[in-house]
Image: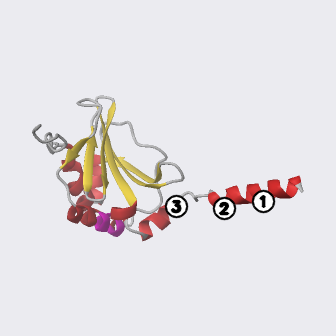
Amino acid sequence: MKSLVFAIALGGLALANPSFPMPKLAEVLRGSLTDKARIRWSKTVEGNRVQLTISGGVAERLNPNMSPEPGRLKYDLDKNRELERLIKAAHLGASNARSPSSMDSDRTLEILAEGPTEWVVVGTWVMPGKSWKKKRPALFTMLDPLFDVQAEVFGNMKGPEK
């Protein structure tokens, strides 16, 4: 009897906490990158990785050389949808790297999807900036200038106190 109760309890836990499969790149690319994924573009500056993360019409730049917190950039859903279209049209193929590059001349494109407990990288492509510009010019010209855009410094501040 005790073993039956124990088996039912374990079965109940399994139903209450179904396993969450790890996302695959092909599945993520079939869906909406704007709604269900994050796109990360990065480069190395003075030994630190500078990252642009784009998702749901929001772009943030994390530059450890300037601030420990990400700065929000001027970006919108239309630009995000255009970026999604460019990534899908680029036919990037299988990932060509396991991790981001640490070379100053390289750029890394990563696609992240929601995993069981956090966002996970499902695809990583690394090439020198010149190669991105030559082989994937539309992606490069859409993403790389965001490294130089001024962050919305006052975008996250509260209004005047009353």
Does residue 55 lie above or below 65 as drawn?
A: below
Q: Which residue is mark 1?
A: 8
Q: Position of residue 130 (x, y in %)?
A: 26, 49
Q: Nearer the viewer, residue 155 or 132?
A: 155
Q: Which residue is mark 3?
A: 24
Instruction: Report the residue at 81% width, 53% height from top.
Output: 6
Instruction: Report the residue at 34% width, 50% height from top.
Output: 40
Q: Which residue is mark 2?
A: 15
Q: Horizontal placement of 26 versus 104: left or right?
A: right
Badge 3 density bin: few <14, some 14–19, many ≥20, Cα 10 Å: some
Mark 2 or mark 1, whichever is nearer to me: 1
Q: Position of residue 137 (x, y in %)?
A: 24, 59
Callout 2 amino acid: Leu
> Which quadrant holds the N terminus?
bottom right
Q: Position of residue 3 (x, y in %)?
A: 87, 54
In this picture, which residue range is highlighted in magenta?
A: 84-89
Badge 2 density bin: few <14, some 14–19, many ≥20, Cα 10 Å: few
Q: Horizontal placement of 121 versus 57: left or right?
A: right
Residue 153, quarter of picture? top left
First in sequence: mark 1 or mark 3? 1
Badge 1 density bin: few <14, some 14–19, many ≥20, Cα 10 Å: few
Instruction: Based on the picture, tell me whether residue 121 belongs to the magenta stretch.
Output: no
Q: Dot 3: what SS?
A: loop
First in sequence: mark 2 or mark 1? 1
* Residue sitting at the far front: 162
Q: Position of residue 81 (x, y in %)?
A: 27, 66
Q: Dot 2: what SS?
A: helix
Callout 3 amino acid: Lys
